[in-house]
Amino acid sequence: MEPVRFGLVGYGFGGRYFHAPLLAAAPECAFVGVVTTSPDRRELLGREHPGVAAFGSLQELAAAGAEAVAISTPADTHTPLTDQALDLGLAVVCDKPFALDAPTARASVERAERAGVLLSPYQNRRWDSDFLTVRSLVDRGELGTVTRFESRFERFTPDPGPGASGGGTLLDFGAHLVDQALVLLGPVATVYAEWRVRESGLDDDVFVALTHTSGARSHLSGSWSEGAPGDRFRVSGTTGSYVVGGPMDGQEAALVAGQTPATLGAGWGVEPPERYGRVQRGDASETVPTVPGAWSTFYPAFATAVRGAGAVPVDPWDAVASLTVLDAARRSATEGVVVRL
């Protein structure tokens, strides 16, 4: 198919490492430009992606012939930029958190539907190697019926920690943690949450307990200040459990190191044996090779959807569902109550 002319808004950490390299590596996409007014970031763009233009606004990007745009900017700008891009007729990929709350997310999704323009949240962690392994084991019935899903995004950043642009750990890490839980175990009936408010005024050391309508439970933890990060996943079922430790999926580290799906080829997303998890049944333990990570599949799938040949890789209503849970978690942590959905 003819490549989709794709632009990017923002060239900070996320735009530079999570979006630009994957757009540039996807044959289905023509990476045409970045909206950034920072002289330093324009200089970086010119050095790292020669021939990719810099623009001063979304209007300029659209006028140059872009058909789609990825938004990777501070969290509180996601909704206005998404809505502006939709009004310009651009298909939109919006980084997480998709919005600051569920009603705002719902308004953007309905706006896209009225305009007949494609919209998708960038939930790339659905294609983490370890989560793909979890899904494979569950789909094959290797663990029996899942009863509890434990998932952690834990890192150590000395005070004062991340700035306000991320919106706090509940939104920053919770956007991925909750999305994965919903993908694996379905809708949620009740939400309980705890957090610590840091000196910056932002929440951290977040714990969220979900009871799914199926009866399964998710225990989710997120922290930027955990000196001893726990296992990435422990998934308990009626016939066994899967455990995998850290560090996290290696695709982020590969992109930061300048590697891309184009440079690594078949080696992209492959985890070394020492990072494999294991299935345990009491004293019996079996090492499970990790399924290769596949962040590289998101933009080809979205471009295919723009050309009318498939669905978007992440349904935008999934973001509304996740943010409904996160809104409930915020209320629970603030009021000390269990919230029923």
Image (tube, rainbow, N blue to C red):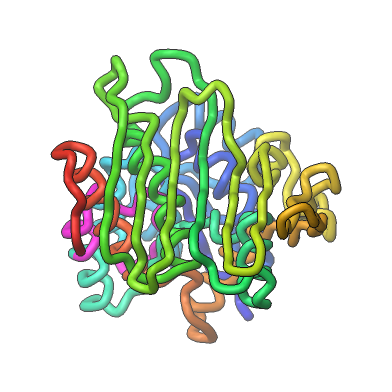
Q: Position of residue 174 (x, y in %)?
A: 39, 46
How many marks on residues? 0
- Using the image as rendered, state which of residue 316 and residue 19 is in the foreground: 316
Quick check: 243 left or right of 103?
right
Quick check: 7 left or right of 266?
left
Image quadrant in which you'd find residue 206 = top left
Image quadrant in which you'd find residue 30 = bottom right
Specify start and end residues of the magenta stretch as a single range. 89-106
- The reply to whether residue 63 is in sight is yes
Quadrant the N terminus occupies: bottom right
Q: Work out whether 47 lies above or below 116.
A: above
Instruction: Please report the residue visible at 58 percent of the width from the left and 57 percent of the height from the top.
Output: 235
Query: Does the stretch in magenta take in 15?
Result: no
Give the farthest residue toward the left.
335
Quick check: 152 left or right of 283?
left
Instruction: Please report the residue visible at 42 percent of the width from the left and 13 percent of the height from the top.
Output: 159
Quick check: 263 left or right of 204?
right
Q: Position of residue 316 (x, y in %)?
A: 35, 68
Q: Position of residue 136 (x, y in %)?
A: 67, 70
